Amino acid sequence: MFTQFFGNYLLHQQLVSPEHLSEVLQSMKSTRLKLGVLAINAGLMTAAQVEKAHDEQQRVDKRIGDVMVDMGFLTKDQVENLLRTQPAGHLLLGQALVDNGYMTTTQFEQALNSYKQENSLSDADSANVSDDTARKLVTHFYNFSAGSNTSYMTGYVSLLFKNLIRFIGDDFTPMDARAVSGTLSDCIAQRIEGGLSAITIIDADASTMIEFASRFAKEQLTDADEYTQACVSEFINLHNGLFAVNVSNDTGVELKLEPQCYYDNLDISELSNACVIPVCFSFGTVNFIISM
Amino acid sequence: MSALKVMVCDDSMFVRKKMKDAVAAAGVTEIIEAADGQQAIDKYKAEKPDLVFMDIIMPVKSGVEALTEIKSFDSSAKIVMASSVGTQENLKEAILAGAYDFLQKPIANDDVAKIISKASK
Protein backbone atom coordinates (compact mmCIF):
# COMPACT_ATOMS: atom_id res chain seq x y z
CA MET A 1 0.00 0.00 0.00
CA PHE A 2 3.01 2.27 0.61
CA THR A 3 3.95 1.77 -3.06
CA GLN A 4 0.54 3.00 -4.30
CA PHE A 5 0.55 6.17 -2.17
CA PHE A 6 4.19 6.83 -2.99
CA GLY A 7 3.23 6.52 -6.68
CA ASN A 8 0.69 9.30 -6.18
CA TYR A 9 3.40 11.42 -4.51
CA LEU A 10 5.65 11.00 -7.55
CA LEU A 11 2.76 12.16 -9.78
CA HIS A 12 2.09 15.17 -7.54
CA GLN A 13 5.75 16.16 -7.62
CA GLN A 14 5.61 15.77 -11.41
CA LEU A 15 8.58 13.42 -11.23
CA VAL A 16 6.79 10.87 -13.38
CA SER A 17 3.90 10.98 -15.86
CA PRO A 18 0.66 9.02 -15.23
CA GLU A 19 1.37 6.92 -18.35
CA HIS A 20 4.90 5.98 -17.23
CA LEU A 21 3.74 5.20 -13.68
CA SER A 22 0.93 2.98 -14.96
CA GLU A 23 3.30 1.16 -17.33
CA VAL A 24 5.84 0.54 -14.57
CA LEU A 25 3.25 -0.59 -12.01
CA GLN A 26 1.91 -3.10 -14.49
CA SER A 27 5.33 -4.45 -15.36
CA MET A 28 6.11 -4.85 -11.64
CA LYS A 29 3.27 -7.36 -11.31
CA SER A 30 5.28 -9.92 -13.19
CA THR A 31 8.56 -9.30 -11.38
CA ARG A 32 7.44 -9.26 -7.75
CA LEU A 33 7.54 -12.59 -5.99
CA LYS A 34 4.73 -13.22 -3.54
CA LEU A 35 5.43 -14.54 -0.04
CA GLY A 36 3.83 -17.89 -0.96
CA VAL A 37 6.20 -18.38 -3.89
CA LEU A 38 9.16 -17.50 -1.68
CA ALA A 39 7.97 -20.00 0.97
CA ILE A 40 7.54 -22.78 -1.60
CA ASN A 41 10.94 -21.99 -3.06
CA ALA A 42 12.49 -22.22 0.41
CA GLY A 43 10.79 -25.59 0.98
CA LEU A 44 8.80 -24.21 3.92
CA MET A 45 5.31 -24.60 2.48
CA THR A 46 3.51 -26.70 -0.11
CA ALA A 47 1.46 -25.16 -2.93
CA ALA A 48 -1.72 -26.51 -1.29
CA GLN A 49 -0.84 -24.77 1.98
CA VAL A 50 -0.19 -21.49 0.14
CA GLU A 51 -3.56 -21.80 -1.58
CA LYS A 52 -5.28 -22.44 1.76
CA ALA A 53 -3.60 -19.40 3.29
CA HIS A 54 -4.69 -17.22 0.36
CA ASP A 55 -8.29 -18.48 0.69
CA GLU A 56 -8.20 -17.67 4.40
CA GLN A 57 -6.70 -14.23 3.82
CA GLN A 58 -9.70 -13.26 1.70
CA ARG A 59 -11.90 -13.75 4.75
CA VAL A 60 -9.86 -12.04 7.43
CA ASP A 61 -8.30 -8.59 7.43
CA LYS A 62 -4.73 -9.75 8.05
CA ARG A 63 -1.46 -9.71 6.16
CA ILE A 64 -0.67 -12.95 4.34
CA GLY A 65 2.39 -13.58 6.55
CA ASP A 66 0.27 -13.33 9.71
CA VAL A 67 -2.31 -15.71 8.23
CA MET A 68 0.45 -18.24 7.44
CA VAL A 69 1.70 -17.98 11.05
CA ASP A 70 -1.85 -18.31 12.47
CA MET A 71 -2.44 -21.42 10.37
CA GLY A 72 0.79 -22.95 11.68
CA PHE A 73 2.50 -23.07 8.27
CA LEU A 74 5.34 -20.68 9.15
CA THR A 75 6.88 -19.12 12.25
CA LYS A 76 7.16 -15.35 12.64
CA ASP A 77 10.91 -15.60 12.16
CA GLN A 78 10.49 -17.52 8.91
CA VAL A 79 8.10 -14.84 7.58
CA GLU A 80 10.56 -12.10 8.48
CA ASN A 81 13.44 -13.94 6.85
CA LEU A 82 11.45 -14.53 3.66
CA LEU A 83 10.35 -10.89 3.48
CA ARG A 84 13.97 -9.82 3.87
CA THR A 85 14.83 -11.70 0.66
CA GLN A 86 12.13 -9.78 -1.23
CA PRO A 87 12.75 -6.12 -2.09
CA ALA A 88 9.85 -3.93 -0.96
CA GLY A 89 7.36 -2.86 -3.66
CA HIS A 90 8.42 0.78 -3.70
CA LEU A 91 12.05 -0.22 -4.26
CA LEU A 92 11.01 -2.33 -7.23
CA LEU A 93 8.99 0.66 -8.45
CA GLY A 94 12.08 2.85 -8.16
CA GLN A 95 14.24 0.27 -9.90
CA ALA A 96 11.77 0.01 -12.79
CA LEU A 97 11.48 3.81 -13.12
CA VAL A 98 15.25 4.17 -13.20
CA ASP A 99 15.73 1.20 -15.57
CA ASN A 100 13.23 2.71 -18.01
CA GLY A 101 14.97 6.07 -17.85
CA TYR A 102 11.93 7.84 -16.38
CA MET A 103 13.86 9.04 -13.29
CA THR A 104 17.43 9.15 -12.09
CA THR A 105 18.54 7.22 -9.00
CA THR A 106 19.19 10.51 -7.21
CA GLN A 107 15.71 11.84 -8.02
CA PHE A 108 14.16 8.62 -6.72
CA GLU A 109 16.18 8.63 -3.52
CA GLN A 110 15.34 12.28 -2.81
CA ALA A 111 11.63 11.73 -3.51
CA LEU A 112 11.52 8.64 -1.27
CA ASN A 113 13.23 10.40 1.62
CA SER A 114 10.96 13.46 1.31
CA TYR A 115 7.86 11.28 1.20
CA LYS A 116 8.89 9.30 4.29
CA GLN A 117 9.72 12.49 6.14
CA GLU A 118 6.42 14.19 5.26
CA ASN A 119 4.49 11.11 6.43
CA SER A 120 6.71 10.41 9.48
CA LEU A 121 7.40 6.91 8.19
CA SER A 122 10.37 4.72 9.07
CA ASP A 123 12.16 2.30 6.76
CA ALA A 124 10.31 -0.56 8.47
CA ASP A 125 6.95 1.16 7.83
CA SER A 126 7.62 1.37 4.13
CA ALA A 127 8.88 -2.22 3.86
CA ASN A 128 5.98 -3.90 5.65
CA VAL A 129 2.84 -1.82 6.05
CA SER A 130 1.04 -2.49 9.34
CA ASP A 131 -2.56 -1.48 10.08
CA ASP A 132 -1.32 1.63 11.89
CA THR A 133 0.89 2.63 8.96
CA ALA A 134 -1.99 2.07 6.54
CA ARG A 135 -4.20 4.38 8.61
CA LYS A 136 -1.36 6.91 8.82
CA LEU A 137 -0.96 6.91 5.01
CA VAL A 138 -4.71 7.33 4.49
CA THR A 139 -5.04 10.03 7.17
CA HIS A 140 -2.20 12.01 5.67
CA PHE A 141 -3.44 11.65 2.10
CA TYR A 142 -7.15 12.31 2.55
CA ASN A 143 -8.72 14.98 4.69
CA PHE A 144 -11.68 13.27 6.30
CA SER A 145 -11.81 15.59 9.31
CA ALA A 146 -14.87 17.48 8.02
CA GLY A 147 -17.27 14.60 8.73
CA SER A 148 -18.39 13.16 12.04
CA ASN A 149 -17.26 9.60 11.25
CA THR A 150 -13.58 10.31 10.63
CA SER A 151 -12.31 7.23 12.40
CA TYR A 152 -14.74 4.92 10.58
CA MET A 153 -13.91 6.59 7.26
CA THR A 154 -10.15 6.20 7.78
CA GLY A 155 -10.55 2.53 8.70
CA TYR A 156 -12.93 1.97 5.80
CA VAL A 157 -10.64 3.52 3.18
CA SER A 158 -7.48 1.81 4.56
CA LEU A 159 -9.29 -1.52 4.29
CA LEU A 160 -10.53 -0.64 0.80
CA PHE A 161 -6.97 -0.24 -0.48
CA LYS A 162 -5.89 -3.47 1.20
CA ASN A 163 -8.85 -5.28 -0.38
CA LEU A 164 -8.10 -3.80 -3.80
CA ILE A 165 -4.56 -5.21 -3.52
CA ARG A 166 -5.94 -8.52 -2.21
CA PHE A 167 -8.77 -9.07 -4.72
CA ILE A 168 -7.94 -6.97 -7.81
CA GLY A 169 -4.22 -6.20 -7.97
CA ASP A 170 -1.57 -3.76 -6.79
CA ASP A 171 -1.09 -1.89 -10.08
CA PHE A 172 -3.06 1.20 -9.06
CA THR A 173 -2.53 4.73 -7.84
CA PRO A 174 -4.96 6.34 -5.38
CA MET A 175 -5.93 9.83 -6.57
CA ASP A 176 -7.04 12.87 -4.58
CA ALA A 177 -10.58 12.73 -3.20
CA ARG A 178 -13.12 15.13 -4.65
CA ALA A 179 -16.60 16.33 -3.75
CA VAL A 180 -19.62 14.43 -5.03
CA SER A 181 -21.89 15.98 -7.64
CA GLY A 182 -24.25 15.07 -10.45
CA THR A 183 -25.71 11.77 -11.54
CA LEU A 184 -24.01 8.45 -12.12
CA SER A 185 -25.04 5.88 -14.68
CA ASP A 186 -24.49 2.11 -14.55
CA CYS A 187 -23.13 1.96 -11.02
CA ILE A 188 -23.32 -0.50 -8.14
CA ALA A 189 -24.05 0.39 -4.53
CA GLN A 190 -24.40 -1.18 -1.12
CA ARG A 191 -25.79 0.42 2.01
CA ILE A 192 -24.61 -0.25 5.55
CA GLU A 193 -27.07 0.24 8.40
CA GLY A 194 -27.07 -0.44 12.12
CA GLY A 195 -24.48 1.36 14.22
CA LEU A 196 -23.44 3.40 11.19
CA SER A 197 -25.37 4.63 8.18
CA ALA A 198 -23.27 4.53 5.03
CA ILE A 199 -23.36 3.85 1.32
CA THR A 200 -20.57 2.86 -1.06
CA ILE A 201 -20.97 3.18 -4.81
CA ILE A 202 -18.62 1.80 -7.47
CA ASP A 203 -18.60 3.76 -10.72
CA ALA A 204 -16.50 3.17 -13.83
CA ASP A 205 -16.91 3.08 -17.59
CA ALA A 206 -18.03 -0.22 -19.14
CA SER A 207 -14.61 -1.53 -20.21
CA THR A 208 -13.05 -0.70 -16.81
CA MET A 209 -15.95 -2.38 -15.01
CA ILE A 210 -15.46 -5.52 -17.16
CA GLU A 211 -11.72 -5.68 -16.38
CA PHE A 212 -12.31 -5.02 -12.66
CA ALA A 213 -14.91 -7.82 -12.60
CA SER A 214 -12.62 -10.15 -14.61
CA ARG A 215 -9.80 -9.74 -12.12
CA PHE A 216 -12.10 -10.30 -9.16
CA ALA A 217 -13.74 -13.39 -10.71
CA LYS A 218 -10.39 -14.67 -12.07
CA GLU A 219 -12.01 -15.26 -15.47
CA GLN A 220 -11.95 -13.12 -18.61
CA LEU A 221 -15.32 -11.42 -19.07
CA THR A 222 -16.24 -9.60 -22.26
CA ASP A 223 -19.63 -7.95 -21.70
CA ALA A 224 -20.95 -5.36 -19.26
CA ASP A 225 -23.83 -7.67 -18.41
CA GLU A 226 -25.59 -8.93 -15.28
CA TYR A 227 -22.75 -11.35 -14.50
CA THR A 228 -20.17 -8.53 -14.58
CA GLN A 229 -22.40 -6.49 -12.27
CA ALA A 230 -22.68 -9.50 -9.94
CA CYS A 231 -18.88 -9.80 -9.73
CA VAL A 232 -18.39 -6.11 -8.89
CA SER A 233 -21.28 -6.34 -6.40
CA GLU A 234 -19.62 -9.26 -4.67
CA PHE A 235 -16.36 -7.31 -4.31
CA ILE A 236 -18.19 -4.52 -2.51
CA ASN A 237 -20.06 -7.07 -0.40
CA LEU A 238 -16.84 -8.80 0.69
CA HIS A 239 -15.19 -5.47 1.45
CA ASN A 240 -18.15 -4.25 3.50
CA GLY A 241 -18.35 -7.63 5.24
CA LEU A 242 -14.71 -7.42 6.34
CA PHE A 243 -15.28 -3.83 7.48
CA ALA A 244 -18.30 -4.92 9.55
CA VAL A 245 -16.22 -7.68 11.17
CA ASN A 246 -13.43 -5.19 12.02
CA VAL A 247 -15.92 -2.72 13.52
CA SER A 248 -17.62 -5.47 15.52
CA ASN A 249 -14.27 -6.78 16.84
CA ASP A 250 -12.80 -3.33 17.58
CA THR A 251 -15.80 -1.47 18.98
CA GLY A 252 -18.58 -3.99 19.57
CA VAL A 253 -20.82 -2.01 17.18
CA GLU A 254 -22.83 -4.30 14.90
CA LEU A 255 -23.42 -3.26 11.29
CA LYS A 256 -25.97 -4.65 8.88
CA LEU A 257 -25.36 -4.84 5.15
CA GLU A 258 -28.21 -4.31 2.70
CA PRO A 259 -28.38 -6.26 -0.58
CA GLN A 260 -26.27 -4.62 -3.31
CA CYS A 261 -28.13 -2.69 -6.01
CA TYR A 262 -27.43 -1.81 -9.62
CA TYR A 263 -28.51 1.67 -10.75
CA ASP A 264 -28.73 2.83 -14.35
CA ASN A 265 -29.09 6.38 -13.00
CA LEU A 266 -28.27 7.58 -9.50
CA ASP A 267 -28.29 11.17 -8.25
CA ILE A 268 -25.43 11.51 -5.75
CA SER A 269 -25.53 15.28 -5.25
CA GLU A 270 -27.55 15.00 -2.02
CA LEU A 271 -25.29 12.45 -0.26
CA SER A 272 -24.03 13.76 3.09
CA ASN A 273 -20.43 13.50 4.31
CA ALA A 274 -19.54 12.01 0.96
CA CYS A 275 -16.52 12.03 -1.30
CA VAL A 276 -15.32 10.42 -4.51
CA ILE A 277 -12.08 8.46 -4.29
CA PRO A 278 -10.75 7.75 -7.78
CA VAL A 279 -8.39 4.80 -8.07
CA CYS A 280 -6.36 4.73 -11.23
CA PHE A 281 -5.63 1.16 -12.38
CA SER A 282 -3.58 0.32 -15.44
CA PHE A 283 -6.87 -0.66 -17.18
CA GLY A 284 -8.90 2.43 -16.21
CA THR A 285 -10.16 4.54 -13.33
CA VAL A 286 -12.60 3.17 -10.77
CA ASN A 287 -14.43 5.74 -8.63
CA PHE A 288 -15.47 4.80 -5.11
CA ILE A 289 -18.15 7.13 -3.79
CA ILE A 290 -18.37 6.79 -0.03
CA SER A 291 -20.87 8.50 2.27
CA MET A 292 -20.79 7.89 6.02
CA MET B 1 -20.02 -39.09 -6.28
CA SER B 2 -22.60 -37.89 -3.75
CA ALA B 3 -26.28 -38.84 -3.90
CA LEU B 4 -27.30 -35.66 -2.12
CA LYS B 5 -29.64 -33.13 -3.70
CA VAL B 6 -28.25 -29.68 -2.87
CA MET B 7 -29.81 -26.24 -3.23
CA VAL B 8 -27.69 -23.08 -3.50
CA CYS B 9 -29.44 -19.82 -2.71
CA ASP B 10 -27.80 -16.44 -3.32
CA ASP B 11 -29.03 -13.29 -5.06
CA SER B 12 -25.66 -12.97 -6.82
CA MET B 13 -25.38 -14.83 -10.12
CA PHE B 14 -21.60 -14.87 -9.62
CA VAL B 15 -21.78 -16.46 -6.14
CA ARG B 16 -24.35 -19.02 -7.33
CA LYS B 17 -21.97 -20.06 -10.12
CA LYS B 18 -18.99 -20.33 -7.74
CA MET B 19 -21.09 -22.21 -5.22
CA LYS B 20 -22.45 -24.62 -7.85
CA ASP B 21 -18.88 -25.27 -9.04
CA ALA B 22 -17.78 -26.00 -5.45
CA VAL B 23 -20.76 -28.31 -4.83
CA ALA B 24 -20.21 -30.12 -8.14
CA ALA B 25 -16.47 -30.47 -7.34
CA ALA B 26 -17.52 -32.27 -4.15
CA GLY B 27 -19.28 -34.89 -6.30
CA VAL B 28 -22.88 -33.64 -6.17
CA THR B 29 -24.78 -33.95 -9.46
CA GLU B 30 -28.25 -32.75 -8.46
CA ILE B 31 -28.05 -29.01 -7.78
CA ILE B 32 -30.98 -26.59 -7.56
CA GLU B 33 -30.70 -22.78 -7.58
CA ALA B 34 -32.68 -20.06 -5.85
CA ALA B 35 -32.07 -16.29 -6.12
CA ASP B 36 -33.77 -15.01 -2.95
CA GLY B 37 -35.23 -16.20 0.34
CA GLN B 38 -38.78 -16.61 -0.98
CA GLN B 39 -37.60 -18.66 -3.96
CA ALA B 40 -35.62 -20.82 -1.54
CA ILE B 41 -38.75 -21.55 0.51
CA ASP B 42 -40.84 -22.34 -2.59
CA LYS B 43 -38.18 -24.56 -4.13
CA TYR B 44 -37.50 -26.29 -0.82
CA LYS B 45 -41.18 -27.27 -0.58
CA ALA B 46 -41.21 -28.50 -4.18
CA GLU B 47 -37.81 -30.22 -4.33
CA LYS B 48 -37.00 -31.24 -0.74
CA PRO B 49 -33.21 -30.90 -1.07
CA ASP B 50 -31.00 -32.77 1.42
CA LEU B 51 -28.77 -29.74 2.02
CA VAL B 52 -29.10 -26.00 1.40
CA PHE B 53 -26.39 -23.32 1.16
CA MET B 54 -28.13 -20.02 1.90
CA ASP B 55 -26.83 -16.45 1.69
CA ILE B 56 -27.95 -14.18 4.54
CA ILE B 57 -28.16 -10.80 2.80
CA MET B 58 -30.78 -11.09 0.05
CA PRO B 59 -33.66 -9.02 -1.29
CA VAL B 60 -37.35 -10.03 -0.97
CA LYS B 61 -36.69 -12.30 2.02
CA SER B 62 -33.38 -12.58 3.90
CA GLY B 63 -31.59 -15.88 4.41
CA VAL B 64 -32.38 -15.98 8.13
CA GLU B 65 -36.09 -15.35 7.45
CA ALA B 66 -36.09 -18.16 4.88
CA LEU B 67 -34.21 -20.45 7.30
CA THR B 68 -36.75 -19.80 10.07
CA GLU B 69 -39.69 -20.45 7.75
CA ILE B 70 -38.25 -23.66 6.30
CA LYS B 71 -37.42 -24.96 9.80
CA SER B 72 -41.05 -24.27 10.85
CA PHE B 73 -42.35 -26.89 8.41
CA ASP B 74 -39.26 -29.14 8.28
CA SER B 75 -37.34 -29.14 11.52
CA SER B 76 -34.81 -31.63 10.10
CA ALA B 77 -33.79 -29.30 7.22
CA LYS B 78 -30.02 -28.95 6.86
CA ILE B 79 -29.37 -25.31 5.99
CA VAL B 80 -25.87 -23.83 5.90
CA MET B 81 -25.82 -20.05 6.19
CA ALA B 82 -23.22 -18.07 4.19
CA SER B 83 -22.24 -14.46 4.67
CA SER B 84 -19.43 -11.99 4.08
CA VAL B 85 -20.08 -10.71 7.62
CA GLY B 86 -18.56 -13.38 9.84
CA THR B 87 -19.30 -11.67 13.16
CA GLN B 88 -20.16 -13.52 16.37
CA GLU B 89 -23.54 -11.79 16.23
CA ASN B 90 -24.39 -13.22 12.78
CA LEU B 91 -23.08 -16.64 13.75
CA LYS B 92 -25.20 -16.62 16.92
CA GLU B 93 -28.30 -15.50 15.01
CA ALA B 94 -27.86 -18.27 12.42
CA ILE B 95 -27.31 -20.96 15.05
CA LEU B 96 -30.29 -19.82 17.12
CA ALA B 97 -32.46 -19.96 13.99
CA GLY B 98 -31.36 -23.59 13.50
CA ALA B 99 -28.55 -23.36 10.94
CA TYR B 100 -26.67 -26.61 10.23
CA ASP B 101 -23.39 -24.72 9.76
CA PHE B 102 -21.97 -21.30 8.88
CA LEU B 103 -19.68 -20.39 5.97
CA GLN B 104 -17.81 -17.15 5.61
CA LYS B 105 -17.48 -15.66 2.13
CA PRO B 106 -15.58 -15.89 -0.13
CA ILE B 107 -16.49 -19.56 -0.07
CA ALA B 108 -13.58 -22.02 -0.06
CA ASN B 109 -14.22 -25.25 -1.99
CA ASP B 110 -12.62 -27.27 0.83
CA ASP B 111 -15.15 -25.99 3.36
CA VAL B 112 -18.05 -26.83 1.04
CA ALA B 113 -16.66 -30.34 0.50
CA LYS B 114 -16.31 -30.91 4.26
CA ILE B 115 -19.94 -29.89 4.88
CA ILE B 116 -21.20 -32.11 2.06
CA SER B 117 -19.21 -35.01 3.46
CA LYS B 118 -20.65 -34.36 6.96
CA ALA B 119 -24.21 -34.15 5.59
CA SER B 120 -23.78 -37.39 3.65
CA LYS B 121 -23.13 -39.41 6.82
Image: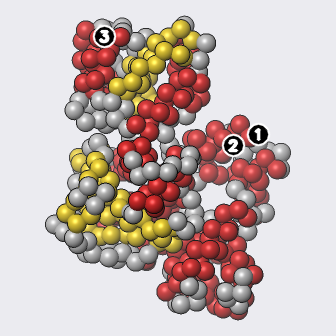
Q: Residues within 10 Å of mark 2 (few under 14, many from 20)?
A: some
Task: Determine whether, in the image, residue B98 is placed left or right of residue A109.
Answer: left
Q: What residue is pinned by disc 3?
A: B46
Of the residues shown, which amino acid type is indicated by label 3? Ala
Could you say where residue A59 lies in the image, as x and y percent from the top left? 50, 43
x 35%, y 25%: residue: B34
Residue that badge 1 annotates: A46
Tell me which amino acid carries mark 2. Val
Q: Quadrant of residue B54?
A: top left
Q: Depth check: A152 or A266 in front?
A: A266
A99 vs B53: above or below: below
Which chain letter matches label 2?
A
- Residue found at x 70% / y 54%: A35
- Quarter of the image where the C terminus of chain A is located: bottom left
Nearer to me, A118 or A34: A34
- Label 1 residue SS: loop
Front of the two marks 3 and 1 = 3
Instruction: Using the image, determine if residue B110 lies above or below residue A158.
Output: above
Q: Check disc 2 and report the residue beneath it.
A: A50
Q: Viewed as shown, does residue A111 lie left or right of A254?
A: right
Between A80 and A56, the one nearer to me in the picture: A56
Q: CA distance from mark 1 to mark 2?
A: 6 Å
Q: Nearer the viewer, mark 3 or mark 2?
A: 3
Name the element at disc 3. helix
